[in-house]
Image (cartoon, rainbow, N blue to C red):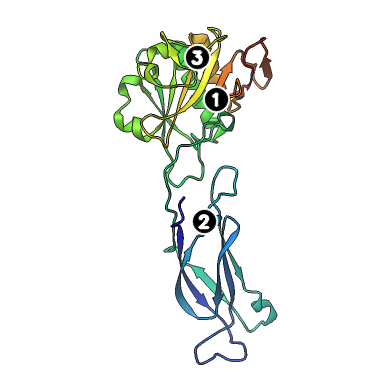
Amino acid sequence: MNTNAKISLRSNFAGGAASGSVTNQGTVVGGLLTILFNNRIVDTVVLDQNGPFIREISIPAGALAPISSDGRNLLSMVFDASVNCDNPDIQSTLIVSSGSEIDLQHDTISPSLDLSAFPYPIYLPQALLPTATTIVLPDAPTIGEIQSAMAGIAGLGSITNGDLTANLVTESKLTAEVRSTNNLIFVGNPSKFTVLQALLLPIPVANGKFSLSGLQDNDGVVQAAISPWNQANVLLSIGGNNDEAVIKAGQALGSGGIVTSGGRPDVSVISSIAPANEEVVSRRPGRWQTLVTIISL
């Protein structure tokens, strides 16, 4: 967000008895309203006038840093009407109108690519404008590729409590509009996707295969990149160089417990998959290691 963020607070206050009596100006004893943004006080309103009021509040730059682990901002309002307790003759009521507005002017930035935080950034439960997700299969998918996609869809539904739903299309049905507006998850052998072979993935595609020293044919590969069609969206590649590898990658995606490999947050290489609710660590000399937990579905 940039420094032009502001709050337009529309409220209606009704105070009770005055302190002694109502002044000629109609001042009453009502209390205080404190407005905080990300736990920083941005304004304090003295409630000493009956009736509706509008308060324009600028949010300082120092309050724009999110305090939650998932990047959400927190707006809080504290109505201090302790004067009501000290004097039973005073009754204060404050109504914050639904017509109040918050203007968070922002700059579009690319999300961080950290598979250990998955399902972030595909799944942002408190996003004001959530981004749709589309899973892309090859035009002629194998049984293994379909199985991998289904495992991914079921797993995403499980780890998000059903909040995230994903569309499923084949590559030829992937429209320009969907490419530019959706997070994309490509599931399958890289040789069967024309688009993947032209992208700059962490593990590149060469001669129709993921090219990495020490990568075995049966190793599943999960990797993340910024979408080339929209810098605010994410592209995931869930695949491998054969069906067994693709299935492993799909199961890892659906587990929600992706462990990154080789010191890179955007890559996970899956050598083996544990039985349901068990954990296996694949350790091969000189190779990346990964831990995958598969949840019974």
Mark 1, other Cα within 10 Å: few <14 / some 14–19 / many ≥20: many
Which of the two labelled residues, at mark 2 and mark 1, occupies the earlier sequence position?
Answer: 2
Which of the two labelled residues, at mark 1 and mark 3, occupies the earlier sequence position?
Answer: 3
Out of 145 and 297, give the one closest to the viewer.
145
Q: Quadrant location of residue 261?
A: top right
Out of 41 and 293, give the one closest to the viewer.
41
Q: Position of residue 204 (x, y in %)?
A: 46, 16
Mark 3, other Cα within 10 Å: few <14 / some 14–19 / many ≥20: many
Labels 3 and 2 touching (C-beta < 8 A): no
Residue 61 numbered mark, or none: 2
Callout 2 amino acid: Ala
Which of the two labelled residues, at mark 3 and mark 2, occupies the earlier sequence position?
Answer: 2
Callout 3 amino acid: Val
Labels 2 and 1 touching (C-beta < 8 A): no
- Seen at 58% across and 77% down, the residue is 92
Q: Position of residue 185 (x, y in %)?
A: 44, 25
Q: Quadrant of the C terminus?
A: top right
**Would residue 278 appear left or right of 78 to someone viewing this image?**
right
Mark 2, other Cα within 10 Å: few <14 / some 14–19 / many ≥20: few
Q: Quadrant location of residue 216?
A: top right
Residue that mark 3 sits on: 246
- Seen at 34% across and 20% down, the residue is 171
- Seen at 53% across and 72% down, the residue is 94
Tag count in the figure?
Answer: 3
Q: Quadrant location of residue 195?
A: top left
Provide the secondary structure element on which disc 2 rests: helix
